[in-house]
Image (cartoon, coloured by chain):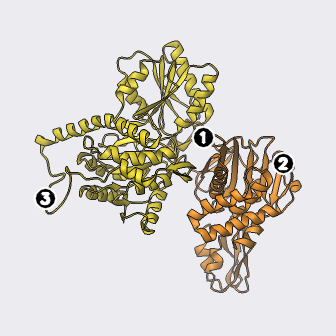
Amino acid sequence: MYEVRFHGRGGQGAVMAAQALASAAFQEGNYAVAFPYFGAERRGAPVMAFTRVDKDKIFSKTLIYEPDYIVVLDDKLCGLVDVSDGLKDSGMAIINSAEKPEDIKLGKAVKCATVDATTVALETLGQPITNSAILGAFAKATGLVSIDSVVEGIMDIFGNRIGERLATKNANAAKAAYEVTQVGTCQGGFECEKADKWLPGYDELPLGLATRPMETPEGLVGPGSFVDNKTGSWKTFAPIYDPDKCIMCRMCWFYCPDGAIKEVGEGDAKTLEFHHEYCKGCGICANECPKDAIKMER
Amino acid sequence: MVKRVVTGNYAAAFAAMLAKVDVIAAYPITPQTFIVEHLSEFVNDGLLDSAFMRCESEHSAMSACVAASATGVRTYTATASQGLALMHEVLFIAGSAHLPVVMPVVNRTVAGPIGIWAEHNDTMPQRDCGWMQVYVEDNQEVMDMTIQAFKIAEDKRVLLPIMVCLDAFILSHTVEPVDFPEQDKVDKFLPPYRPDHAVLDPKDPMIIGSFSPPEYIQEVRYQTDETMRNALEVVEEVNAEWAKEFGRDYGGLIEEYKTDGADAILITLGTVTSTARDIVDEYRAAGKKVGLVKLRFFRPYPTEAIRKVASKCKAIGVYDRAVSFSAGGPSWIEARNALYGYTIPVINVLAGLGGRDVTEPDIRLMFDKVLEAAEKGEAENEIVWIGTRGVKP
């Protein structure tokens, strides 16, 4: 049996990648299971998905704590989430990154493969959705499934969800990524800055979880605690603001779902400030702007 | 036979198509939404000739199912959590009118606080509304039991609605290989629904659910009780027929796994059963005498089967993914009721509430507690909370 943990963000398709890998392994005569673990259901939020593959029927219905492989769909997650947590020493990390495996820093030095899946995806799909490309890298790096089976798995899982035409494009992304995957060893010893989770005993938990703003050793919880949650790393594209074109209609401010746009200055000097540490790069501001004063750039 | 890697939700939807349901009335709710979404696609693509009603709430969806089923057609819906809670008052109508609606319920925690993950506190409180409940363990069983559910529910000795209960995400959003039964074999196994007890037809008038003074309702309750008891036998018959035709035997009301020679037996329901099988294998290999009973039907409750299990072991543990506050887990309460007069310890293990992962160490601890009770002939604590911060298990 081998176990794979996928790290991605809501909307990047980690779940479909895990399912397509299961389907690919199944095409080769294995038993395979894939399942998600959702946190809060938000586009851009870190998510995990899992695949288990074995020759015989798999009974375990638990999450995977000691994976043989980790697959990271977005290398910026490596600084936010301890992606190599529990990864077996004999394991391997497959990472979407423009860097060489030797330049990747994880919690432990392990076999590592990198592929610039974002560029591959933009070239083959026109969108920075890397779930299919990364499977090509998995096939190349591990040799556990053939690229032909990965293509079949993508056609099966993606085909059912988004139709044959788009599934074919995704299969092509996997094939393209397969060709440009680099395999090596990453650096270890990187300590992820992620804060510990606030996990009090039942007798310290506010009754019914009705929570006032509260300082805890793990950080602020309750109303306003979002200030600690720097969601800006979730984005692929960032808004670039041109104050000369801006007529201060504030449509961007009104529509921004994250309150990441702030009005600053007085009188004629009034302008807008974009808080990139919270902006998730959804692009709604650029879409709403009537004067093209906001451009989304990678 | 075609085998595909699909989610539990897909299996539940596909099974409804194989059963050729006439009416689907539903309202979406996470994590069930994909079931009715897949069905809407099957209908749209011309694969399934069924009336698909998108309702404005679960209360309306169940009301529509009651009305549709009362015209004598095969009726299906699906829900979860708050959706099931909103259906509550209408569930009684379906049960008392003997309308064999089939409804997968994707077990999800009922707020508050709001959560979307697996807990059985949505279906357990519905035990008294005249619906059967079967809990399943994997996606193959989702497929197979959804089809069997129609046959059990529509049996003339039963005629009761049924919930097929599957754990949120752990099955609903998990893909695994599933055998797809062939249509012609399903047709042979499950003939069309042709009732005569409840058929609204202007040419042959009938009143269903009319105002009924005390002279009548007590007998109506007895009818429901009797037909629910009849279902005990029908479940076993349908399981045997399924095993013969499709090669998969689920054991009927319960399934026993390595219970022969076991001192300590754990009774589980839902997906925890599946992981527990691995732990039983591990413990047996280490010489520990443990066994597993998968409680499949919670209604009708298999009292006799549970008594037979108790008569061959020294202690029983009952796993619950829900709690009746101050009284223990619902499945344990039922087991203790069935085992009144038995002297062996029967303890309750609670874990996985709100969708918390029930890990292998959690399940080992469950077996350890039952083994300890078997050895001592008594248990220190009757109700054990496992994996609760601040609470000693």
Camera sees residue B78: no
Looking at the image, residue A111 lies above or below residue A253: above
Q: Nearer the viewer, residue B297 or A219?
A: B297
How many badges with numbers are in the image? 3
Q: Where is residue B316 drawn, in percent x and y?
A: 47, 23
From the viewer's perspective, tell me whether residue A38 is left or right of residue B324: right
Crowd tier of the residue under label 1, counting other residues whose Cα lies within 10 Å: few below 14, some 14–19, many 20 or above? few
**Residue under label 2:** A111
Badge 2 and badge 3 both on one subunit: no
Q: Where is residue A180 drawn, in percent x and y?
A: 82, 63
Q: Chain under label 2? A: A
Q: Distance between the residues labelled 3 and 1?
A: 53 Å
Looking at the rendered structure, which numbered label has been put on residue B295? none
Looking at the rendered structure, which numbered label has been put on residue B205? 3
Q: Distance between the residues labelled 2 and 3?
A: 75 Å
Give the residue displayed 56% in from the left and 19% down from the top: B289
Q: What residue type is labelled 1?
A: Lys
Residue A114 falls in image quadrant: bottom right
Give the residue displayed 71% in from the left and 79% down from the top: A295
Looking at the image, residue B15 lies above or below residue A274: above
From the viewer's perspective, tell me whether residue B242 is left or right of residue A102: left
**Residue under label 1:** A57
Looking at the image, residue B393 lies above or below residue A189: above
Q: Is mark 3 on a helix, strand or loop?
A: loop
Q: Which lettered chain is shown in orange?
A: A
Crowd tier of the residue under label 3, counting other residues whose Cα lies within 10 Å: few below 14, some 14–19, many 20 or above? few
| Disc nearest the viewer among 2 and 3 | 3
Q: Is mark 2 on a helix, strand or loop?
A: strand
| Disc nearest the viewer among 2 and 1 | 1
Q: What residue type is labelled 2?
A: Lys
